[in-house]
């Protein structure tokens, strides 16, 4: 068993919002579900806990999105897959090119994927 090094945040956005994502600029995020794939070489659980906290200094692209009151993390999962492999195997639409992909060398385009409004029932 390899220790998990990759995490996915399942994010629910209650309403369509416009958020400035640092240097990426202002972007429109339709209401619905998103999956963000990230990795941490150590202390992955601390990293995931940090993402679930709203009060923090904005550091990563994902922080700008999660800082918005309409956004919440509904589920987190850990994986031992490589970050980009897991991201590329996740179905979804890229809304913001470059989001979370500053360190990506695998051509993912974005580490945030929009899963659409109707993927969750209830
Ligand atoms: Zn990637």
Image (tube, helix red, strand yellow):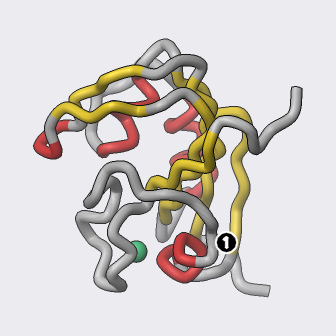
x, y percent for residue 63 = 37, 35
| 111 horizontally vs 27: left or right | right
| 20 horizontally vs 34: left or right | left
Badge 1 local density, few (<14 within 10 Å), some, or many (20+)? some
Query: Mark 1: is the Cβ under 8 angstroms from ligand 1?
Result: no
User: Who's the residue at 52% across and 60% down the image?
Assistant: 37
User: Who's the residue at 80% across and 86% down the image?
Assistant: 1
Ligand 1 image position (quadrant):
bottom left
Vertical relation: 95 (above or below) 2: above
x, y percent for residue 101 = 31, 64
| 70 horizontally vs 107: left or right | right
User: Who's the residue at 39% across and 21% down the image?
Assistant: 17
Residue that numbered label 1 is attached to: 4
Give the quadrant of the C terminus: top right
Where is residue 104, by image quadrant? bottom left
x, y percent for residue 62 = 39, 42
x, y percent for residue 27 = 26, 35
Element at label 1? loop
């Amino acid at each position: 068993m390899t220790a998990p090094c990759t995490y996915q945040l399942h994010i629910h956005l209650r309403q369509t919002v416009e958020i400035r994502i640092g240097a990426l600029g202002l972007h429109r995020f339709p209401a619905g579900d998103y999956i963000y794939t990230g990795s941490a070489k150590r202390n992955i659980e601390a990293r995931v806990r940090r993402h679930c906290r709203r009060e923090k200094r904005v550091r990563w692209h994902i922080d700008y999105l999660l800082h918005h009151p309409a956004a919440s993390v509904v589920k987190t999962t850990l994986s031992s897959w490589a970050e980009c492999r897991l991201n590329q195997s996740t179905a979804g639409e890229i809304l913001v090119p470059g989001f979370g992909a500053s360190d990506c060398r695998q051509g993912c385009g974005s580490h945030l994927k929009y899963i659409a409004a109707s993927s969750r029932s209830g």
